[in-house]
Amino acid sequence: MNQHAYGESLEVSWQLDKTTVDGTLVRPSGPGPFPAVVMVAGSGPTDRDWNSPLLPGTNGSARLLAEALARAGIASLRYDKRVIGPHARENMALLIGKVSMQSHADELSGAVRVMTSQEYIHSDRIFALANSEGTLHALNYQLHNPEIPLAGLVLIGPPGRPVGTVGRSQLAAQAARVPNGDALLALYDAAIARFLAGEPIVPDPALPEGVQMLLKSLETPANLPFARELWTADAAPLLGQVNVPVLVIIGKKDLQVDWQADGEKLEQAAAGKKEVTFLFPENTNHVLKQELRPRSELVPVEITESYNGPDTRLDPQALASIQAWLAAHA
């Protein structure tokens, strides 16, 4: 147990089947009982702090959120997906060919059980706070009759269109900046069509190396069947089925999910649901960090590389909104 100005931090782990899940519990100062959030990370090898080995920097948004929420009297648990973190190697050997949307929901389920076992937690006031791909796992968990339902969801940067459609829109924006971009995009589309048909992807050598690596990663045994499930996953119809309070946040400086294209689909799905709240903060990026540069000056590669830089901070407007929403529903 580590003492901090905001409370106490404790490393925890628990078993899921034959694998181990690792996480960090943060308890605010005081006796409790406290409301709590379980944080669900975004795509790829994103860890419990929402850092990634694919991006520079270790100033992850989840750790900053946990500390800020603790100061506001809200406990949290953030955890590593089983294919990263301290037990990644032994977990991976057991999970090849078994990673799926359900296995991600199982990880979240275990985290919720751990949270409810803490005597200082208000067990029926546990919320999910999820980012990007993690929003899909939070929605799936809530919609599959969980043993311990969540009291509400905070969804940061959820895709309002199928994940594959969102990904293609990002590549299309980059292709528009290079010569022969349309032809390259057609090669990408052909490779994805083979992938969805269950055929070998075989990326065309003319595609940029980074795109070839992305395509090849989709069909690695460690990513299946999950990659095919994820490609067609869409938060909008799931949001339309949820019957607990939800806060949806998509920043106007988010270059991975579009606050207009995705936000509109999500708003349509939630039409008539009074307990679904939308926020589109002016200076928030995909990982809830403050971004003051004009959107027209932002380049996708450059902005993602700055996600977890040492000088980045959570967007004050978005953070205040999350704290106020949780306080109102706790």
Image: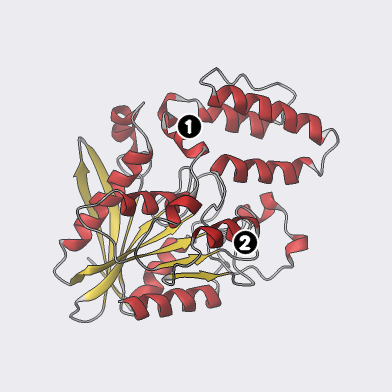
Mark 2 Cα-neighbour bin, 10 Å: few <14, some 14–19, many ≥20: many
Residue 32, horizontal then vertical, whole percent = 20, 78
Mark identifier at residue 68: none
Q: Which of 106 and 267 lies nearest the eye of the viewer?
A: 267
Residue kind at label 1, given as amino acid type = Arg
Along the viewing direction, whichever of 191 and 43 lies nearer the viewer: 191
Q: Residues within 10 Å of mark 1 (few under 14, many from 20)?
A: some
Left or right side of 69 for 59 = right
The answer to which quarter of the image holds residue 182 is top right
**In the rendered image, which quarter contains the C terminus?**
bottom left
Residue 181 in the image: x percent, y percent?
80, 35
How many circles with numbers are drawn on the protein?
2
Q: Residue at x 44, y 73 (%)?
A: 322
Dot 2 amino acid type: Trp
Residue situated in front as seen by the camera: 10 or 97:
97
Considering every residue shown, the one lying at the far front of the view is: 272
Quarter of the rendering containing residue 226: top left
**Residue identified by numbered label 2:** 259
60 vs 198: above or below = below
Precedes in sequence: disc 1 or disc 2: 1
Between marks 1 and 2, how big is the CA–CA gap? Answer: 25 Å
> Which residue is under mark 1?
228
Q: Residue at x 31, y 74 (%)?
A: 74
Residue 146: tell me if it is visible: yes
- Vertically, is 139 above or below 100? below
Counting from the top left corner in percent of width and height, residue 153 is at 38, 63
> Which residue sits at x=55%, y=62%?
267
Query: Does 188 sit left or right of 316 as displayed?
Result: right
* Whether residue 42 is situated above or below residue 263 in the rendered picture: above
